[in-house]
Image (tube, rainbow, N blue to C red):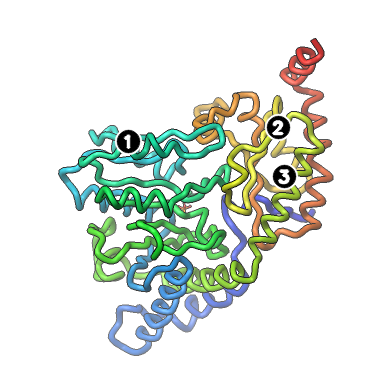
Amino acid sequence: MNVIYLDNNATTQVDPEVVQAMLPFYSELYGNPSSMHSFGGGVAAKIREARGNVARLIGATADEIVFTSCGTESDSTAIRAAIESYPSKRHLVTSRVEHAAIKNLFESLSKKGYRTTFVPVDRQGRLDLDYLYENLTDDTAIVSLMWGNNETGVVFPIEEISRRVKERGIVFHTDAVQTVGKIPIDLSRTGVDMLSLSGHKIHAPKGIGALYLRKGTKFAPFMIGGHQEKGRRGGTENTAAIVGLGKAAEMANMHMASGSYTEVGELRDQLENQILAQVPNTFVNGDRASRLPNTTSIAFEYVEGEAILLMLNEHGICASSGSACTSGSLEPSHVLRAMGVPFTAAHGSIRFSLSRYTTRQEIDFVLEKVPPVIARLRQMSPFWKNATLEARG
Ligand code: PLP
């Protein structure tokens, strides 16, 4: 059975050119980039090249890029750096819809005595900007807001927000793990001090990420050890993965310039519009006017998301749901709850996330399968029966 992979916000296929670029670093090019000899020096040169490619993807300079092991490490490094650099400041700001990498860190810091503000969003997943600005104080050590949401794809106006936060003299971090490589980013036009990105969301392998650190930003390393990454992250470099990330960044730049993501957006819109037209009681979670081009979260009212996923899986279709299995009960995701999506819809929410590898034929196939799957599940759903009886009066 063919796999129709529409779960690219979970992880992406590694680009074959990325694999090719990495392979020599698992065989003949095994030198340590910190070595004095030219065998290691050759590897260091390749790391420099990768750093330049990653910097170009986000409008930064090469020495502002610190390689890490993943998006989560970049997020933790950024928040902890701000806390350590401004020890007298005890207030931290984020949103209610962040990824666990930020959400759980903030919750843990809150238990350690930091005052935390979680800025709410509206029904479309848009940030309450007035609430954000009203809650900034001289005690705020850092504001950390995601650029694009991993579940709904909603994009926050980070350029504008970061400039406003900077005007208050507060450090600004953005988790751009889902955004980098999907929409153009030019950090030179923003007030962003730190940005997190992750390789496996942009067709590089898992286990490699980067933190952008604006020149002049106060910093304290999370991983203390050798002088690697100019002392900003100790540990012998994961050379193959760094080279892979560099290649993936180069490819992402090229694909964005050639309009690949416009095509991805068109396929996403086709999928979304036709599902909405063909399946009653469905709606899109999130602001359709400001979203990542590859993501849609569709609520199918009165059905279980997990049941939909299992039935789609029988057709080889990979997607994900808006629920998280917590302590045995299926809780709708914190993102959909923060948006106020009704329980009966949050439970039946499915995220489809496309990539530049997604084809029109695949979308047509999904469109053929989704309506009968939902119809079959609704026939079995007591909630759907009640809802349709109520609608008939
Ligand atoms: N931030 C966001 C928005 C994400 O979507 C993810 C992964 O899904 C992460 C952070 C964590 O990235 P990583 O898996 O590289 O640790």
Label of residue 300 in the image: 2
Disc 1 CB within 8 Å of nearest ligand 1 atom: no
The quarter of the picture where residue 69 lies is bottom left
The quarter of the picture where residue 221 lies is bottom left
Q: Residue at x 54, y 69 (%)?
A: 248
Q: Would you call the spot at circle 1 few (<14 residues within 10 Å), some (14-19), or many (20 or more)?
A: few
Decide which of tag 3 and tag 2 comes sooner along the chain.
3
Between 341 and 237, the one lying in front of the other is 341
Q: Cβ–Cβ below 8 Å for labels 1 and 2? A: no
Q: Cβ–Cβ below 8 Å for labels 3 and 2? A: no
Q: Secondary structure at mark 2?
A: strand
Label of residue 54 in the image: none
Residue mark closest to the camera, 1 vs 3: 1
Which residue does the numbered mark 3 point to in the structure image?
272
Residue 327, position as x, y percentages in the image? 50, 27
Q: Say if residue 306 shows up in the picture.
A: no
Q: Is residue 201 above or below residue 314?
A: below
Instruction: Give me the C-alpha separation between circle 1 and circle 3.
Output: 36 Å
Q: Residue at x 71, y 55 (%)?
A: 266
Residue 113, position as x, y percentages in the image? 23, 33
Between 292 and 4, the one lying in front of the other is 292
Q: What amino acid is at disc 2?
A: Phe
Instruction: Give me the C-alpha separation between circle 3 and circle 2.
Output: 12 Å
Q: Residue at x 58, y 29 (%)?
A: 341
Q: Say if residue 177 shows up in the picture.
A: yes
Which residue does the numbered mark 1 point to in the structure image?
134
Disc 3 CB within 8 Å of nearest ligand 1 atom: no
